[in-house]
Image (cartoon, rainbow, N blue to C red):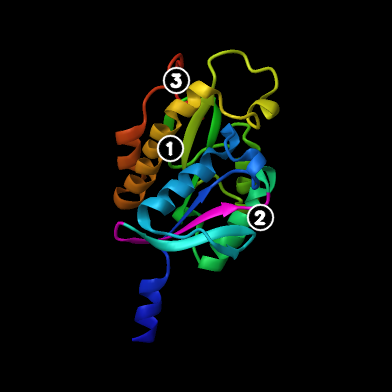
């Protein structure tokens, strides 16, 4: 009976939003993952207040699934250590991870769900792949390219959102939270079919 109860209480998914801790970075493109984690927490009554595995963590239910929500506090480029520690703490494999993050190769407002793939130059995702030793984990990628040449990507992702983006931010974060919920409830293939759209101005899917 105790073992059965423990199995029921064990989470079935780890959802990690990537970002940087601190007010300075709160409303910058690189913190979209944090904003989506906060939106999911708000929707499902989950408090992101526990300090565990170098992260702020909350545990609760999203639909029928028991889920751990997390925001690593290691700064973006070292996110992998926190993600690996979270998976180990929760006894989950990489196949039960959903990583949510900004993507400079996609136009602002575009959303792409993927079952696996490369980091695409995103240093936070590079860190996760390096620490986990696999690229096979689900991710929700959130486009932040402004539609004009970006001379310094590292500076751009840490610059506050433009005013026009702030007007669209709430809807974008909502859509990303919707995508995570569908992925958890129905699987990555269903989420891809429902949410993926070819990026404006793009000839093909990114690897």
Answer left or right for 20 relative to 171.
Answer: right
Region in magenta: 63-74
Q: Quadrant of the N terminus?
A: bottom left
- Disc 3 or 2, which lies upstream in sequence? 2
Q: Residue at x 62, y 35 (%)?
A: 122
- Disc 3 or 1, which lies upstream in sequence? 1
Q: Check if mark 3's residue and mark 2's residue have beta carbons within 8 Å.
A: no
- 61 vs 103: above or below: below
Answer left or right for 44 relative to 16.
Answer: left
Label placed on residue 204: 3
- 107 vs 40: above or below: above
Distance from Cα at disc 3 to Cα at disc 2? 32 Å
Q: Quadrant of residue 62?
A: bottom left
- On the image, the x and y values in percent for residue 82 come to 63, 56
Q: Quadrant of residue 54?
A: bottom right
Q: Does dot 3 land on a helix, a strand or a loop?
A: loop
Residue designated by label 1: 173
Q: Residues within 10 Å of mark 1 (few under 14, many from 20)?
A: many
Residue designated by label 2: 81
């Amino acid at each position: 009976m105790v073992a059965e109860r423990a199995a029921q209480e064990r989470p079935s998914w780890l959802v990690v939003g990537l970002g940087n801790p601190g007010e300075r970075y709160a409303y910058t493109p690189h913190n979209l993952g944090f904003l989506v984690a906060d939106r999911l927490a708000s929707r499902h009554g989950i408090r992101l207040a526990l300090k565990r595995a170098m992260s702020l963590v909350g545990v609760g239910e999203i639909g029928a699934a028991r889920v751990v929500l997390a925001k690593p506090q290691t700064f973006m480029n070292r996110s992998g250590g926190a993600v690996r520690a979270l998976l180990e703490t929760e006894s989950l494999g990489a196949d039960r991870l959903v990583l949510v993050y900004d993507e400079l190769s996609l136009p602002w407002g575009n959303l792409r769900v993927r079952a696996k793939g490369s980091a695409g130059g995103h240093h936070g995702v590079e860190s996760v792949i390096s620490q986990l030793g696999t690229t096979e984990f689900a991710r929700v990628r959130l486009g932040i390219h402004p539609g004009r040449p970006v001379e310094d990507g590292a500076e751009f992702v840490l610059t506050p959102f433009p005013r026009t983006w702030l007007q669209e931010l709430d809807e974008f974060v909502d859509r990303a939270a919707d995508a995570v919920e569908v992925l958890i409830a129905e699987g990555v293939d269903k989420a891809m079919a429902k949410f993926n759209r070819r990026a404006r101005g793009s000839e093909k899917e990114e690897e």
